């Protein structure tokens, strides 16, 4: 299991996966925006999405859970 967490305070611009999706390490899970920069969030490992904890428009803090992969 891999918990993908926010590395900074940011706005969630887009969520590109849904529960059940199979993803590879280079798959963009979430697109964040901070200080007018877009930051793609990529998993370290592949897997299947078991939980999506955010939606577009949310504001996340450093360490907040974004996506869980099994």
Image: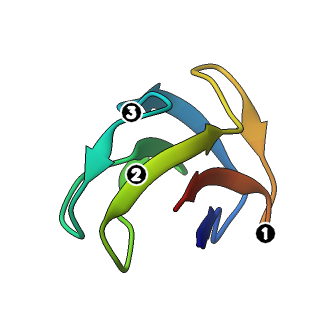
Within 10 Å of disc 3 (Cα), the crowding (few <14, some 14-19, many 20+) is some
Whichever of callouts 2 and 1 sits on the residue coming sooner in the sequence is 2
The nearer-to-camera label among 2 and 1 is 2
Q: Earlier in the sequence, mark 3 or mark 1?
A: 3
Front residue of this view, candidates 66 and 62: 66
> Could you tell which of marks 3 and 2 lies nearer the N-terminus?
3
Q: CA distance from mark 3 to mark 2?
A: 10 Å
Q: Which label lies toward us, 3 or 2? A: 2
Q: Residue at x 75, y 36 (%)?
A: 59
Name the spot of residue 47 as percent of width and height, x first.
36, 62
Q: Is residue 19 left or right of residue 37?
A: right
Indicate whether 52 appears above or below 68: above
Q: Is residue 53 left or right of residue 36?
A: right
Quadrant in the picture for residue 52: top right
Q: Which residue lies most toward the bottom here?
A: 44
Name the residue located 78 percent from the left edge and 69 percent from the top edge.
63
Residue count near mark 1 (Cα–Cα under 10 Å), binned few <14, some 14–19, many ≥20 = few
State the residue position of label 1. 63
Above-or-below relation of 46 to 14: below
Label 3 residue SS: loop
Kindly identify which numbered label has been placed on residue 17: 3
Q: State which quarter of the image contains the N terminus.
A: bottom right
The residue mark sitting in front, 3 or 1, is 3
Residue at the spot 57% in from the left edge and 34% down from the top edge:
12
Residue 54 visible, this angle: yes
Q: Is 16 left, or right, of 13 in this rendering? A: left
Image disc number at residue 48: 2
């Amino acid at each position: 299991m891999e918990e993908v967490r926010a590395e900074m305070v940011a706005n969630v611009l887009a969520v590109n996966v849904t529960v059940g999706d199979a993803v590879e390490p280079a798959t963009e899970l979430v697109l964040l925006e901070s200080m007018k920069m877009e930051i793609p969030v990529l998993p370290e490992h592949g897997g299947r999405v078991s939980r999506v904890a955010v939606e577009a428009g949310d504001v996340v803090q450093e360490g907040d859970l974004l996506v869980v992969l099994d």
